[in-house]
Amino acid sequence: MAPVPSIRLDGITKHYGPVVACDDVELVLWPGRIHGILGENGAGKSTLMKILTGLVHPDGGSISLRGRQVGIHDPQTAADFGIAMVHQHYSLVEQLTVWENVVLGERSRLSRHSARRRVAEIGERYGLDVDPDAKVTHLTAGQRQRVEIIKCLRREPSIILFDEPTSVLTPAESEQLFAVLRLVVIEEGRAVALVSHKLDEILHATDEVTIMRGGRVVGRMPTSEATPAGLAQAMVGRPVSLRSEAAALGLVDAVALEGEPAVDAPARPVVLSVRDAVVSGADGLRLLDGLNLDVHAGEVLGVAGVEGNGQRALADVLSSLLALDEGTIEVGGLTVPIGRAGAMAAAGVGVIPEDRHDSGCVLDLSVAENLALSDLGAVSRLGILDRRSMVERARQLMVAFDIQARSPEAPMRSLSGGNQQRVVLARELSARPKVLVAAQPTRGLDVGAIEYMGHRLRQAAADGVGVLLLSTELEEVLALADRICVIHRGRIIGEMSRAEATAERLGLLLGGVAA
Amino acid sequence: MKLENRAPEVTPSSADSAVDQPLARRFLPDGAAVKSGLTSAALYAICIAVALGLCALLVRVTGGDAGAVFSALLDGSFRSPGAWGLTVTTAVPLLAVASGTILCTRAGFTNIGQEGQLILGAAAFAYVATRLDAPGPILLTASLAAGVAMGMLWVGIAALMRFTRQVPEVISTLLLVFIAYQISNYALTERWLLLTDQPGSGTTNSGTPLPAGARLPTFTAFGNQVTIGVFLVLALTMAIAFLIARTTIGFRLRMLGMNARTARRAGVAPARYGGAAMLVSGATAGLAGGLWLSGGAAGDRFTAGISSNLGWQGLLVALLARDRALVAVPMALIFAALRTGSGFLAATGVERRIADVVQAMLVFALLTPPAIRSLQRRRAPKEASA
C-alpha cells in the first residue's frame, strides 16, 4: 500500500491587498516524519501556519487531508481534523494551574480528577515532567512549553505544528524537546512541522526541509542532503558568509569557531556599574536579586540568559522605567537617581528596548519626531519647536543609518520593523551615549537587518561606548560580545571572556548550573 | 505572557504599500486623498441627515411640526434680534471648558469633572466678587483668578490621588462633581458663604447680586450684545492650540499621551506633565464658571442651577472636536446655538427638551464617521501584517 500523506497543500496562495504572503505554496507532511519549514521573518511561514489552523483562508489552492480534499474554515475545524499547533508565544492563563490550562476550551464536562490524571499520564508517556497543580506563573519558560505541548497532545492530534519552539529554551531544554518530538513521531506516526529561522535547529531535528522566501517555496530536500551553506543561500536569496552571518542564521558551532581578538576590557574605565540591584515584582517574586555587573568603555558585554530571568527588569531599570528596591547604579562614576524620568538618558545611557513599540518609539509620531524626541533642545528655540531643523536633522540621520522611509514626515507606523529599529538605534547613538543597552536588539528582524545591527553595536564599542547586550540568542552573544556573563533568576551566575566561552559551558550556565 | 503572537514584521515594500495607506493620505494629496476626502464628506452628510431625519420623525410623532421646530431653533439662536450675541456669549464658557479638556486629553489623562470644577469656579468668583471692595478691573481680575484657582484646586484633588495612589482620575473627577453640587448648595444656605443677605431679593437659595464692577464689559455689534470674554477665550484656545502643536512642552505632553513609557524614558515625568495638564483643564473649567457668571447671560447672581450642564457640554465639545483645539471653536458655537435656540421652542408647542435630543443625535452623527474611519484603518494593517 502506498503511503498517504497526512496533509497535502497544493498551490496555496494568499494576498493581503497588494502583498503576496503565500504564492503557490506546496507542502506535504508525512506521518512519522519531522518536516522543517525554514525561512526569514516575512517569508510566509506564519501565514501558512494560520491557513493550516483555520485562522486565515487562502485565496486559492487546495488542502487534502489523508487523500481527501477538505476546507479548513475555522480553528475548530482544524482541531476536528487533528491539526494542533504549539505557538511561539504561549497561550496560557498565568493565574490558572497546569491542569486548568490544559482543559481550557474543552466543551465536555470538567472533571478535576480525570484532568489531573490525564496530565500526569501524558507527562509520563512523553517525559514531559510537570506538576498538574502548579500555577503557570511559577513555571519557567521550558516548563510552560511542556504544558503547551501536553495541551496539544491530549487531543491526540495527527498533525502537530511547532512555531519557533526553541526561542525561549535553554540548549538542554531544546535537546529534550527534540527527543520528545522523535518519540511522538516515530512511535506514534504523527506528522510534525517545525517552523524555524534557525539553521541549526532544522539541520538537527528534521527529516526533510522546505525553504520559503518572499511567500514562495524556493527549495525542498531531505535534511540529510542539506548543507548549512545551501540552506542559508536559499533562505536569504544570496550567497552568505557563514562566518559573519552565522549569528543571524542561528549557527552556534560556526560562531564558536570564530575567535576574534577580544578587547582588553579591564584596562578601560568602567562606564556602567550596577551594584546589588534588587527589584521585586508585583507578586513578591524577585525580578532582580542582587545583580552586579560592570561594563567597560569600548567593550561589548553580552548577558546571555533564557527569557524571563530578569533581563526585562534590568533593561527597564536602565531606561528609568523601574526603580530599584535596593542597590545603586553608577554611570561614568556618578550615581544616577534611579527611576526618575529621563535620569538614565541624561546620564548617558542609550537603550534599544526589547519591545520598541513599548518604550522605544511613538508610532503615532513622524520619523523626524521620533528621531528628536529625547533631545528636543536641539530642535527648538526658546521652547518653540523648529520643524525645519527637526526635519533637517532627521534627513541626516536617515542617510547615516540608511533608514528607508518615504520622508522624514512619514508616520513611524508606516515603517517596517527593521527600519523602526534603525530609527531607535539612530536616535540613541546620535545622543552620544556612554553606555548603550541593547535588549534583544534583533528579535523579529530579517538576516540583513540583524547583520546591520551587529555591525553597528561593534562599531559603537569601537568608538568607546560601553555596550551591554542582553540576549536570549546564544549565537548572538557569542558573535558580538567581548565578555560574556549569564543571568539566571535575577543574578549573574557566571562570567567569562569570549575566548573562554564555549557553547557547552554557556549552555550549562543558562540552565542554572554553575560551571 | 502574551496571549497572541505579536504581528510579525513585514517587508519594507509591503509595509509601505499596505499598512500606511490611510495615513499616507494625510500627507500625499493624490487621487486617493481626494477620493478619501469625498468619502469622508459623504459619510458626514449621511450621518447628519439621518440624525436630523430621526429628530424630525420624533417631533412628528410627538405631535409637532418639524419645520416649525427647526425654524424656532434658528430664531432662538441666530435670527431674532440680539440672539446671536447671546449664542456667542453662551459659547464662551463651553469653549473655555473644551480647550482645557483637549490639552488634558492629549496628555493621556481623562478629566470628566469639568461640571463640578465650573460650578465651584463660579462659586469662588461670586464669593470674591461680592466680598472684595475694590475698583472694577481689579475686582474682576481677582474674582476670575479665584474661579481659576478653585477649578485647579478641585481637579488637583483628583490629580493628587492619581499620582500618589494611582486612583483613576476618570472616576475621581466624576465623583468630585457630585461633591461640588453639594458644596455649592450648602454655600447657598449660609450667609457667611454665598446666601444673599438682602431680605426679599429673589428666592431663598440665591446668592448676593454681583456688583457692577464684577461684570465683564460687553460690546455691541449689529444690535447684539457680546461679552468681551469671547476675546479672552479665543486667545486662550489659540494659545492652547499653539502650545500643543508647536512647543516642546506640547510635544512632551503629546508624547506622554501616545506612549507614556517612551515619554518617561525621554524625561517626561507623568506626575509633573500629566498633573500640569490636569490642572490646566481644571483652571479653564473654573475660568468658564467665572466667565459665565460675569458674562451677562446667566443672570446677576450665583444660583444652584447656574451651570445647567455647561461643564458636561464643554466635555462633549472637546469630544466632537476630537481633541483639536481650533475645531472646538465651531463646535462650541453649535452647542451654544442649540442651548439658546431651545428657548424658543415653547412657542411651537413642542417639549423644550427636544433640543437635548437633537444635540445628542448630532453628537452621534458627528462621532460616527471617525469611528468608521478608525475601524477601517485598524482593519487594514491587521490584514496586511500576517
Image (cartoon, coloured by chain):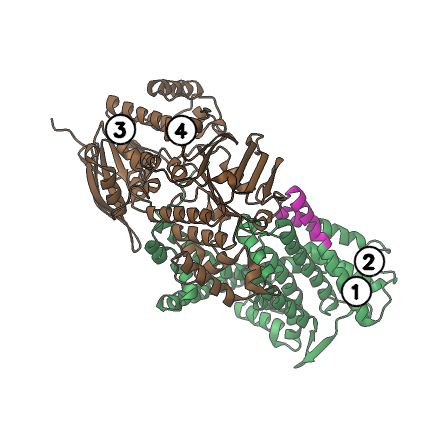
Chain colours: A brown, B green
Q: Which residue is mark 2?
A: B194
Q: In the rendered view, does A190 fall on the left or right side of A291?
A: left
- Which image quadrant: the C terminus of chain A? top left
Same-subunit check for callouts 2 and 1: yes
Image coordinates of residue A60 in percent, x first then y, are 22, 47
Which numbered disc, 3 or 2, marks the residue closer to the eye? 3
Identified by mark 2, the residue type is Leu
Same-subunit check for callouts 3 and 1: no
Front residue of B324/A455: it is: A455
Identified by mark 3, the residue type is Ser
Residue sitting at 65 percent across and 54 percent down?
B278
Which subunit holds the residue at mark 4? Answer: A
Q: CA distance from mark 4 to mark 3?
A: 33 Å
Which numbered disc, 2 or 1, marks the residue closer to the eye? 1
Describe the element under mark 1 as helix, strand or loop.
helix
Which subunit holds the residue at mark 1? Answer: B
Describe the element under mark 4 as helix, strand or loop.
helix
Q: Which residue is mark 1?
A: B142
Residue A135 within the magenta-colored segment of the rendering: no
Which numbered disc, 4 or 3, marks the residue closer to the eye? 4
Front residue of A424/B157: it is: A424
Q: Start and end of the magenta stretch?
A: B153-176
Q: How many marks do you count on the picture? A: 4
Q: CA distance from mark 3 to mark 2?
A: 80 Å
Q: Which residue is mark 3?
A: A158
Q: Which residue is mark 4?
A: A507
Same-subunit check for callouts 4 and 2: no
